Amino acid sequence: MCTLEKRGNIYLLTLTGSGEHRFNPSLLSSLRAALSSLLSSSHPSNSALITCAEGKFFSNGFDQSWVRTAPPSEHHIITDLHKGLISDFLSLPMPTVCAITGHAVAAGCMLALVHDYVVMREDRGFVYMSELDAGIKLVKYFTVFFNEKIPDNQTRRDLLLRSARLTAHEAMDRRIVDRVAHGIEDTIEEAVGLAEEVAATVSDGSKLAEKRKLMFPETWRHVSAAAGSKL
């Protein structure tokens, strides 16, 4: 599922295993439980969180096999939990860095980009909003998030209306990611360096979290109601 490891003042949240890390109730609940410990407990000053994943995928989005087998009355569960996960990241009282170590698709792409900073592996993986290709409706809070996160109309158009698959360098050119690195280890190492750099500038984590919510007010409005959602 996932692990949360403390390395000095840096926390490393890892989606474990060699699968696609698709979001079903079990994985989403596991991720939210890991973040709950950071939201509810004290932590060292100048802390930061890095999220990464093992294997080929960072996350391939919602678990469509779960959707196909679950009763329609339960489909809201994964969206509620995913909204809650996004609200958790917006609420974290520390800088967040995503190390995109593999494909980041649909809901997985949104999770990657909700971080304050993004480092992406250049030799494998892409960021990709697959809903158009898959014939799946883009839910409201996704659209709201991308409107606020990516102000460049052409980039937002290419992601949402053309389902462009952006490599690390293409994503960096479009200012979606901040840095690129080669291979999993180098990507995580680059993310650690960036996390330590930005963490050193934060003296009050709670003020950081409030500013983050103000940066994305409509996203926060759509996801905050799900903050208490649990399986």
Image: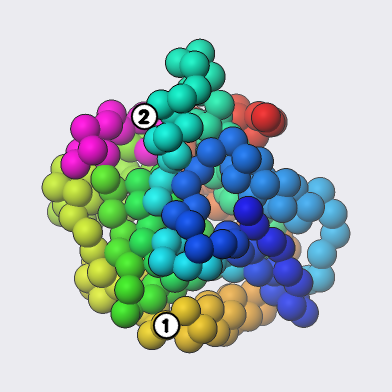
Q: Which of 52 and 196 is in front in this view?
A: 52
Residue 109 visible (yes or no): no
Label 2 or label 1, whichever lies nearer to me, is: 1
Horizontal placement of 210 versus 20: left or right? right
Indicate yes or no whether the magenta region holds residue 140.
yes
Which residue carries the number 1 mark?
183
How far apart marks 2 and 1 lie (CA) works out to 34 Å
Residue 166 visible (yes or no): yes
Image coordinates for residue 66, horizontal then vertical, percent: 48, 32
| Category of crowding for the residue at label 2, using alpha-carbon neighbours closer than 10 angstroms: few (below 14), some (14–19), many (at least 20) | few
Residue under the point 62% across and 40% down: 26
- Pointer 2 and pointer 1: residues touching (CB < 8 Å)? no
The secondary structure type at the circle numbered 1 is helix
Which residue carries the number 2 mark?
140
Q: What residue type is labelled 2?
A: Lys
Image coordinates for residue 221, horizontal then vertical, percent: 52, 32
Q: What residue type is labelled 1?
A: Gly
Q: Specify the color scheme.
A: rainbow
Residue under the point 60% across and 45% down: 27
Which quadrant is home to the C terminus?
A: top right
Q: What stretch is highlighted in magenta?
A: 131-142
**Looking at the picture, does residue 215 appear above or below residue 125?**
above
Residue 4 placement: quadrant: bottom right
Residue ranking furthest to the right: 42
Q: Earlier in the sequence, mark 2 or mark 1?
A: 2
Horizontal placement of 148 versus 129: left or right? right
